[in-house]
Each structure stands twice: as C-alpha cells, then as structure tokens.
Image (tube, rainbow, N blue to C red):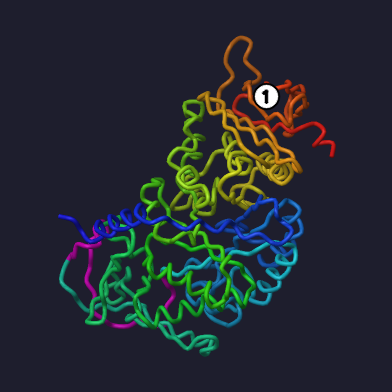
C-alpha cells in the first residue's frame, strides 16, 4: 500500500525533475562586501550567560570585533519570552514579547530586554552585519491555564497508530498573555489551535495525544514521515492549517523584522512543521516587506541527505539548509581518526548535492556534549573541519560561539586561536577558482587560485598518525596554484613547530605543499602576506 506521505514525496520528486528550480538567492551581503566571502557566527551556546551584562549587551560590545574578523551575519538565539525565566526561547511562550512585558516572572528574557536587542541589532547593522532571528514556530509551552477536550492517545513510534479511543483529557493549552494586554496582537490560543500535546493533567499521564474534535483535521500530512508522521515534537504542537493561527504567525513574521531590524530567519525544527505553511510564511514576509533578498536558513536534523532533498526542492530556492550530514561526516572523522578516508569527507552532504543550498557548520548548541543531539566534533579534527568550510569556497559557513569565545561548556583556547586564524585567512586569501587534490585517504588538499585583485591559498588537512622510523613529520601534496602564481614563493600561514620552509612554485604553477600529520596548513603567497 502507498501511504499519503509516500505519494507526496513521489509528487515532489517528479515535479522537481520535470520543472527547473529557481536559483537560490546568495547570502545577503551589505554594500561594500562585494568579495562574496560571507560568514555567519552563531552567537550563543546552550547555557550561554555573561557575568557582567545581558547577552544582547554582550553581543553589542562584540560587534566591532566580529566585523573585523569578516563576519557578515550573526544568528542570535530566539528573542521571544520563554515558559521560564531562564528558558532559551525554544520553550516558546509568547512570540510577541521580546522582553518588554512582565510575564513568567520577568520582563527580560534570558538574553535581555527588547530595548537592548533593538539597540544591539542597530549597532550590528551599522557595522555591516545582518542579524538572523531564530523563529520557533512549531510549538508553544507554558500555557496560562488548562482546558478540557477530547484527545486520542497514539503510539510514540507510529503516530498514525491509535492506542485507544478518544477520551476527555485536561491539557495546559490556553494562552491568555495577560501581561501583554493584547498589545501587538489580540490573539489568544486555545486547544483549538493545536494538533496535539504530551501531558494529560487530569490523570498526570505523559504520552502523545492527538486532539480530536469536529474542527480538528489530525496531524498535518506535510511533515516528515519519521515515526509514521512527525508532526508532533513537544509541548503544544501548533496547527498551521488553522486560519487564526496562520494570520497571527504571518503578522508576527513581518513585525519581528520591522521591530528589531533583523534581516532574516533561522527556522527551528522544520521537519515537524507543515512545509506548505512555512513556504507561505516566507513568501508573505518577502512580499509585505518588499525584501526579495530575505535570507532564511532551516534546521532539518538528519544525517541522511536523501531525507533533506525533498525539502530543498519544495522550498523553491527561498531557504538554505544547515548541512547536518556534513557535520556528521566531521564528527565521524574525529571519532575514527586515521581510519577515516578523507577522500569521502564531503560525500552525502548538502554541500556536494547543491552547494548554494548549504549553510555549513562544524558544531552548534544542539551538538554539545550532554545535549539530546550530542555529536561533538573532537579537537583532533575540529580545525581541519573549519578549514574545509571556511576556505573551500562553496557553501556558507557558520562558526560556533562555543568554539570561538571563552565559555564554561566547550571552550578550548588552541581551537579558538586556530579558528581566528582561519577566519582571517578566509577574509584575506580564500578567493578564486578552486582545484581539489583529494587523492590520499589520510591527507587531502585544495587550491584557491585568487582572482587577480585578491590572492588565493593552498590548504592541506590530515588525519594520519606519524609512522615510520624516524616518524614522518610532514605530508606532501603536489598542487598547482595556477599560471598567474608561477615562480612565486608560498609560506605557511598557520603557526607550526618546526616552521616549514617556504614552497617555491615552478614555472608551470606546481609546488610541493606540506602539512603535519593529524594537522593542517594554509599556504599563502609571501608577497601577499607582506602586503
């Protein structure tokens, strides 16, 4: 039997191949940044705090440093009021409260007040940095009061399988937002606006319940097919087909960018959301604000690019996607050490499938140790991974705050120091046509040849152990840097002990470039370094 979701996927696949897809708008750049080397920073960790100031104020003070490092975009945590005072915002209570009203025991969110947020974004914009708003549109938590209604328990492993008949339960589903007093929006949420929840307050029973009534249509079919149907994730699952819900969320999308000065969205948990609604949300914001360059990036968490491809196709080039499969390649390489074949490091990634759709990253708040999606890239392959996303010239890289800034969760100073140097190399040298030299399982390289006005670089990464007697100290790859760089001298840009000798390129552009085992190196023209 072919189930409805299978038919949907088949239709999407057929329409993709039959009709040409529009080109993806490139990452939005400010005037004066014509180099194309856009760079995003995720400016938070899961438990991020600052001992002396609010997070928004901390961001504001760091804006000049970020701009100097070549950052053109910053992804901030969800700005909305959470269900608890220290909630990160993914436990979304009120989207319309950005730290302005006394709700849930506080005016400020975990990150600060609305006034601080707006000021910080204005400073970022003045420095040529666009700010991405994290939009949590899948669910709500922290209701103001319970309601009684009919619901059907379903199998958590197969949401299409009922575990019993409908029954009356009591759920925390009514959101009144009394503290906001209907400012910005008069919409009040009830159980009619949700598809399901995971708690029956009457019997104190945890489970997944599909809300059942004449008005309810069940789970959306336009979601991921994992667990039969993956519409439900957590909390109160929003029904994006309800006209009142659509009206309120569409209005919020335009309002939050106008209010804050944000330049686009990061969409949380889209595999659980009605993708038709999300597409209409993006088109609505673009139309109402007259911003055809609106940037959007989505989180679809799967290590298998085949699961992500239907979503890439259905969003008509209007959304980029975090390259989760590539992240898992990095994670696997860090765990396997020298057993990992580096020639396959890009295989099965969004970067390889469709580069302009990929926002590449090494780690983020979800992959941190102790998190539900823990898949931390170990330090033995962390900088090699960053070299691949920062200098390769395809995809749009995103650097994680936890790797860049001191913090109590995941900071390692050698990683931070090396990462800053790689970000500098991206800004100064990573330009022009690329040639790959992925011929050795334990050491791969690529060359950026420059574009005339701006220099290029040669990059090598290794995961090999030192072997032999005496142990080998360097890997060598013969690479061609282009005829325009013939007879030039290249020097190592990353600190190394001992410092490698300069590489002299021959009259045909060939040079023997090296890097240490289990390490990396970036080579740049000596005269470019002098400049």
Name, please, the residue furthest toward the top: 469
Q: Give the residue drawn at x 48%, y 63%.
A: 267
Judging by the rendered image, the residue that carries numbered circle 1 is 513
Instruction: Quadrant for the C terminus, please.
Output: top right
Is 157 inside the magenta-drawn segment?
A: yes
Instruction: Quadrant for the N terminus, please.
Output: bottom left
Splitting the image into 4 quarters, where does residue 325 fall? Answer: top left
Is 276 inside the magenta-drawn segment?
A: no
Splitting the image into 4 quarters, where does residue 173 fall? Answer: bottom left
* Majority secondary structure in the magenta region: strand
Residue 422 x %, y %: 68, 41
Residue 529 x %, y %: 80, 36
Q: Is residue 61 above or below residue 457?
A: below
Q: Secondary structure at mark 1?
A: strand
Q: Give the residue drawn at x 32%, y 71%.
A: 197
Residue 434 x %, y %: 61, 37
């Amino acid at each position: 039997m072919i189930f409805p979701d299978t038919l949907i996927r088949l239709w999407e696949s057929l329409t993709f191949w039959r009709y040409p897809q529009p080109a993806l708008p490139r990452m939005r750049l400010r005037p004066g940044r014509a180099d194309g080397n856009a760079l995003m920073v995720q400016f938070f960790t899961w438990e991020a705090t600052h001992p002396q100031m609010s997070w928004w104020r901390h961001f504001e003070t760091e804006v000049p440093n970020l701009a100097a490092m070549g950052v053109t975009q910053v992804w901030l945590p969800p700005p909305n009021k959470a269900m608890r005072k220290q909630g990160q915002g993914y436990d979304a209570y009120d989207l319309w409260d950005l730290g302005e009203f006394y709700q849930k025991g506080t005016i400020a969110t975990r990150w600060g007040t609305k006034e601080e947020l707006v000021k910080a974004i204005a400073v970022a914009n003045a420095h040529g940095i666009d700010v991405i708003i994290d939009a949590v549109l899948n669910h709500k938590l922290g209701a103001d009061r319970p309601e009684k209604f009919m619901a059907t328990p379903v199998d958590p492993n197969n949401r299409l399988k009922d575990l019993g008949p409908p029954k009356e339960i009591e759920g925390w589903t009514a959101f009144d937002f009394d503290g906001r007093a209907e400012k910005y929006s008069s919409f009040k949420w009830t159980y009619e606006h949700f598809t399901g929840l995971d708690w029956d307050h009457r019997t104190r029973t945890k489970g997944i319940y599909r809300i059942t009534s004449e008005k309810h249509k069940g789970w959306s079919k336009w979601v991921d097919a994992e667990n039969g149907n993956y519409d439900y994730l957590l909390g109160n699952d929003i029904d994006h087909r309800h006209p009142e819900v659509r009206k309120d969320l569409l209005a919020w999308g335009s309002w939050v960018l106008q209010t804050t000065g944000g330049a686009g969205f990061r969409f949380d948990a889209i595999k659980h959301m009605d993708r038709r609604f999300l597409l209409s949300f993006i088109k609505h914001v673009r139309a109402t604000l007259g911003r055809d360059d609106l940037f959007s990036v989505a989180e679809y968490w799967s290590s298998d690019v085949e699961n992500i491809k239907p979503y890439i196709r259905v969003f008509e080039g209007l959304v980029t996607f975090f390259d989760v499969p590539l992240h898992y390649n990095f994670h696997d390489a860090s765990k396997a050490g020298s057993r990992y074949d580096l020639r396959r490091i890009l295989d099965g990634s969004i970067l390889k499938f469709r580069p302009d759709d990929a926002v590449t990253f090494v780690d983020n708040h979800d992959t941190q140790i102790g998190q539900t999606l823990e898949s931390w890239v170990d330090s033995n392959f962390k900088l090699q991974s960053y070299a691949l996303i920062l200098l390769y010239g395809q995809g749009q890289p995103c650097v994680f705050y936890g790797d860049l800034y001191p913090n109590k969760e995941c900071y390692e100073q050698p990683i931070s120091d090396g990462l800053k140097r790689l970000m500098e190399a991206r800004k100064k040298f990573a330009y022009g046509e690329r040639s790959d030299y992925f011929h050795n399982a334990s050491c791969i390289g690529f060359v950026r040849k420059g574009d005339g006005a701006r220099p290029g670089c040669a990059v090598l990464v290794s995961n090999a152990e030192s072997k032999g007697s005496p142990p080998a100290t360097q890997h060598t790859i013969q690479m061609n840097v282009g005829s325009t760089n013939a007879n030039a001298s290249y020097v190592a840009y990353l600190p190394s002990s001992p410092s490698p000798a300069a590489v002299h390129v021959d009259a045909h552009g060939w040079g023997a470039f090296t890097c240490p085992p289990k390490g990396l190196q970036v080579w740049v023209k000596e005269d470019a370094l002098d400049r």
